Structure formats: structure tokens, C-alpha cells
Amino acid sequence: MAQYSSEVDGVFVALADPTRRDVIRRLGRGPTSVGELAGEFPMTLPSFMKHVRTLESNGLIRTVKVGRVRTCVLNRDRLALLDDWLAEQRRIWEERTDRLERLVTDALEEQE
Amino acid sequence: MNPELDLTLERIIRAPRAVVWRAWTDPARFARWWVPAPTICRVERLDVQPGGAIVTQLSDDGLQFGPHLDATFLAVEELERLVYTNAVDSTLRPANPSPIAMTAEVTLADHPDGTDYRIIVRHGDPDSRALHEELGFAEGWGTVTKQLAGVAESEAAR
């Protein structure tokens, strides 16, 4: 559970930045080399690489090096964690409401 | 209300509104339903007024307590509505709760069978969600919304 929640944190952290969201969006259209990606963003290569590393360390993308070309690939499974997280929040609130309901209806029965 | 970002829940509770309200606003009662057993909830503060604190701690053994919720009420309308957020902590300091901030709104209304109880939990970070949808995960969110509709309909059918 702790590991799962730190993974979810990582996804939110990685997606919190507009450049990283643009990179994800771009990779949604297919794998792209780091060089080609970097050319599309108005920043220095070291700054851009920082974003790539953040995305990679949080598992949102993988990079594969073939020869001298490093290619970035989107990891869609990791994005699916957002779904799991919302479903988990829903479950917490539903169960919480179940308990509230039980408490208040039991209280009434005791009075009768 | 934005179905992609928000979580909603609707329930007809077979108890009068005042009883449901008391379960939310009386610390001893609140502690009994806020978290699932066997975890023990200690209500540190439950100051039910706009700007008031809602702070709970949790324990597995009843001895060592750890942080749970540290939030602030934004709006309180007696017997009708409660809104709190964890984006501002109980000392009114802006907070960065993990993984993202939320606002929970609880509304109570009279119903022939008791109380019409509704919750909307609004989550922050719309950009991530928008992206998520754009990349073709709308299916997943749709499923959640369908389940919600199912719950709402089965409630209505009762």
C-alpha cells in the first residue's frame, strides 16, 4: 500500500509540470528520439533532460538506447494508476458512508 | 460538478437529518465511523464553523497515533451543508497534501425515508486528468461514472 501510494505520488509529481505533460502528449503519438523531442521544446538540452529523467524515474516513460540514439516510449500502464487511485478514493468514501449509515440507524433502533 | 475530476456519492439514509448531522459534528460519534475498524480514530479538533479545524489521527494499537487528516472547514450551514479542504491546514497555512488536494462537500436534505445525503469530492490537478483523457483513458473514468449512475439508480429504485 505504501509503495502503491508513493507510485501514485510519483505520477502526480511527474504530470504536475507543463513541459512534462507536453512530452507525454507527444509520446502518445508514438516513440520519439530524445534529440527530436528536445528540438520541439524551447529550452537547453540539460534542462530538457531533467524532465526526461523525472518522467523516467517515475515510470511514465521508458528510454531505450539503440546505437547513438536514445528513444522515449510512453508507459501507459503507469498512467492507469490514476484510474486506480480514483477508484480507491471512491471506495473509501462509500465505505465511510456505509459506516455513518450504520451508526445513525443503529442509534435510532437503540432509542426505540 | 465535473465527472472527470470529481467523485460523487448519493445515499438515502434512514435516519433524520439532525441525527446524521450530529454524527458529523460530535467528535465522539465522528470517531466511530470516520475510519474502518480495527484502526482507531482520535478526533483532535472538530470545530464545525467556517475556518474551523478538522484534524484526525489514526492508530493501530490505541497507543501510537499518526497523522491522518489536517484540514479546514470552508463552509458550514447548520443541518444542511459542510465543506472542508485539505489544501489549507488547520492552522490556515496553505498545504500540499499527497498526492493532490481535495475539497469535500457534504449536503443533507429531508427525504420521506430519512435524509438525502450527498457528497462531492473535488480533486485538484485538472491538467493531469485532462491529459489522461486525451491519451485514451476516458474509458476508465467512464466506467467509474457508470458505476456511480448504477448506484444512484439502485438508490432511486428502493
Image: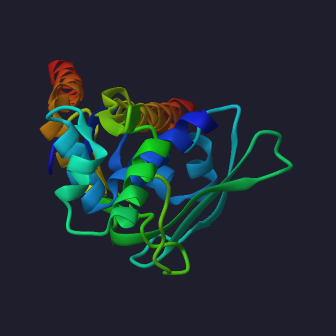
Q: Kindly give the residue lying farthest to the right in the view shown.
A: B63
User: x, y percentage for residue A64?
Assistant: 39, 32
Q: Residue at x 23, y 26 (%)?
A: B140
Snapshot colouring:
rainbow
Q: Nearer the viewer, residue B60 or A73?
A: A73
Q: Is residue B108 visible?
A: no
> How many numbered badges does the structure rendering display?
0
Q: Nearer the viewer, residue B141 or A89?
A: B141
Q: Residue at x 51, y 40 (%)?
A: A7
In the picture, measured across the screen, residue A5 lies left or right of residue A17, that is: right
Q: Residue at x 49, y 61 (%)?
A: B97
User: x, y percentage for residue A13?
Assistant: 42, 54
Q: Is residue B155 visible?
A: yes
Q: Nearer the viewer, residue A107 or A93?
A: A93
Position above or below: A39 against B12: below
Q: Residue at x 46, y 36 (%)?
A: A92
Position above or below: B83 against A15: below
Q: Quadrant of residue B35?
A: top right
In the picture, measured across the screen, residue B5 lies left or right of residue A66, that is: left
Position above or below: A29 against B73: above
The quarter in which the N terminus of chain A is drawn is top right
User: x, y percentage for residue B5?
Assistant: 23, 47
In the picture, measured across the screen, residue B134 lies left or right of residue B74, that is: left
In the picture, measured across the screen, residue B5 lies left or right of residue B85, that is: left
User: x, y percentage for residue A5?
Assistant: 54, 40
